[in-house]
Image (cartoon, grey):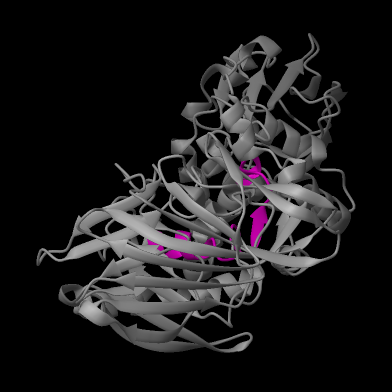
Amino acid sequence: MRFFSAFLTAGLLGLAPVASAQLLQPKSMFTRADSLRGHLSPLRACYDVNYYHLDVQLDVARKALRGSNLFRFTATQDFSRLQFDLFANLKVEKVEYQGRPLPFTREANAVFVTFPTPIRRGSRAGFTVHYAGQPTEAKNAPWDGGLVFSQDSKGKPWVATACQGVGASIWWPTKDHQSDEPDSMLISVTVPKGLKDVSNGRLRKTTPLKGGATRFDWFVSNPINNYDVALNVGDYTHFADEYAGEKGKLTLDYWVLPENLAKAKTQFAANVKPMLKSMESWFGPYPFYEDGFKLVETPHLGMEHQSAVAYGNKYQNGYLGQDRSGTGWGLKWDFIIIHESGHEWFGNNITSQDIADMWIHESFTTYSEALFVESQFGKDAARQYIHGQRRNIRNEGPIIGPYEVNKEGSSDMYDKGSNLLHLIRTAYVPDDARWRELLRGLSRTFYHQTVTTRQVVSYLNQQLGQDLTPIFDQYLRHAGLPTLEVRFSAQGQPQARWIANVPGFNLPVRLRTTGGQYRTVPLTTSFQPLSLPGLTRTNLEVDTENYYVGVLIE
C-alpha cells in the first residue's frame, strides 16, 4: 500500500476511510448567556434597526466610557418587549422612549426593555440607551475583544477598539447580532485635548469643547455590521489621495502617527492602489464609495473595520515580516493591507448572518490574497501561494461552527477555505473570465446583505448548473479531507472512488500517468474503472497541486 497526501498536515486523515469516529469532537457546553448572545430570538427579530447614533465620551485616564446610543427601528411584528445587548460590566443608566424612562431588566450581557404600549408591526420608533463604565480591556488584540489602551512613542495616549467575535456590545449598547445592520449610522466621539478620533465613514464635523476636549462626528451612509464600528484615538496626522475606480473617484484617507508619516506614504503607495485594482477586477467595485477608503494606524495588528481599516503591520511586507505561505510570494506585499482590505468585499459588503458561517468572510478573503498574487505575478505564482497556505491547515474540526451560540468554527476557515475555492475553480471553472464574472456576480447578488452558507452555495450551484453542496459540506462541515482511493485488480485494472463523510460526494479530479497530460475524471463514492492507457500503481499522478485531497493507492 502506498499512501501520500496533498500536504503533510493532512497526516493520516487520508490513510483509511474517514470514519465518523475520527470526527467525534468533545461537545462544548453552551450556556444560557451564549444563547442570549447568539440566538436571533423573537425579542431580537421583532425589530429591524434602521439607524444608530452612538455618542461616546472617552476618559483615557480612567480607561472608561460614558455615552448613549439612539436606536431607530422598524417593527417587524407587534411587540411590547425587546432585547438589546451590553456587557454586564457596563452600567445601563437609563433607557429613554418618547422622553420618558423605560423599565428594563438584565441577564448576562442582554438587556430587556418593556414599552408602555405595544409597538405595532410596520411602525417606526426609537429609544436611547445611556450607559457608562470601564469596558473590557483587550489583552492581545485583535484576537481577544475589547479596547486597547496604549501609548505612542512620545507617551501620548493611543486607544483603539477590536471586538470581532466577542461582539460590539463589549463597549457599546447595540442589537449585537450580525443579521441586522443599520442602514446608516452617526458615530460621535469626544476625546481629551490634543487627541483625534478616527471612526468609520466620513468626518462631518469637528467641535472644540470646554476644557480642551474635541468631539468628532463621523457619518456612515452604508449598512455596517456591529463589530466593524470603531474608534481610533491618538495624536494622528492625516494625508490623502484618490483612486480612479470602477465607480469613479474613490477618496483614500490615511491616519498615522506623525513619526511614521514617511514610512506610511511609501508603504501605502506601494500597496493600496494595486490592491484596489485587483479586488475591483475580481470582485467588482469597492462597496463603499460613499464612505471612502481609510487606513488607520492602530496599536494592534489589524482589523477589517469598514471604511476605516485598522493597520498595525509596522510598515513592512508579509505578516509582521513573515510569509504565511512559505513560498516567498507573501513577502512581496503588505499582508494586513491586502487581507484586511479584502474584507471590505467579504465580511463587510457580504456579511454572514451567524458567526458560525464566518468562513464566508475568511475563506474568500484569504483566497483574495492569492488572487492579488495572480494579478501581480501570474497564475503560477498564485498556485504556489495557495499550495503554500496548506502549511497552516490543521484539519482538526469543522470550519462551520455551531449555530445560534456566537461560536465560530475551526481556524481552517482561512487557508483550507481558500484551497477549497481554488479547487472549485480548477474543477469547474477553468475559464478565467468566467471565474471572474462568477465572483463579481456574488458581490452584486448579495450587495450589502447578510447571508447564510446555504445562500452562497446555492448561488454557485445555480451559476454553474452543478450541485456542489456535497463538496462544500465535506470541506466545511467535517474535519477530514476527502480521500481518492485507487485499487488495481490482479490483472492490473484500476478502479477509483472518493472516500468521504458526505453521502453523494462527487468531484471530478485531474489524473495522469507520469509525464502525460492531465485528464479530468468524474468520480463518486462508488468504484468505477479508470480508463487511462498504461496506468499503473507507480506512474499514477494526481493533481494535488490544485486539489487539496488525500490519496490512497492500493
The vertical placement of 261 against 227, above or below, is below
Tally of numbered tags: 0
Above or below, comparing residue 143 to residue 132 in the picture? above
Judged left or right of residue 214, residue 252 is: right
Apparent side of residue 265 relative to residue 479 in the rendered image (left or right): left
Q: Residue at x 82, y 24 (%)?
A: 525
Looking at the picture, tell me which residue is in the foreground, 106 or 336.
Answer: 106
Left or right of 297, for residue 474? right
Identified at 47% across, 43% down, the residue is 87
- State which quarter of the image contains the C terminus: top right
Residue at (51, 67) in percent of width and height = 306
Q: Is residue 147 above or below residue 374?
A: above
Q: Position of residue 225 (x, y in %)?
A: 59, 59
Magenta-span inclusion, residue 148 = no
Pick the front one: 252 or 426: 252
The residue located at (18%, 77%) in the rendering is: 258
**Horizontal and vertical percent for residue 37?**
60, 39
Which residue is more in the foreground, 400 or 27?
Answer: 27
For the N terminus, give its image quadrant.
top right
Q: Which residues are magenta?
A: 336-359
Farthest left residue in view: 154
In the rendered image, is residue 369 in sight? no
> In x, y percent, where is residue 485?
72, 21
**Do we see residue 231 in this rendering?**
yes
Residue 347 on the magenta segment? yes
51 or 451: nearer the viewer = 51
Residue 227, position as x, y percentages in the image: 51, 55
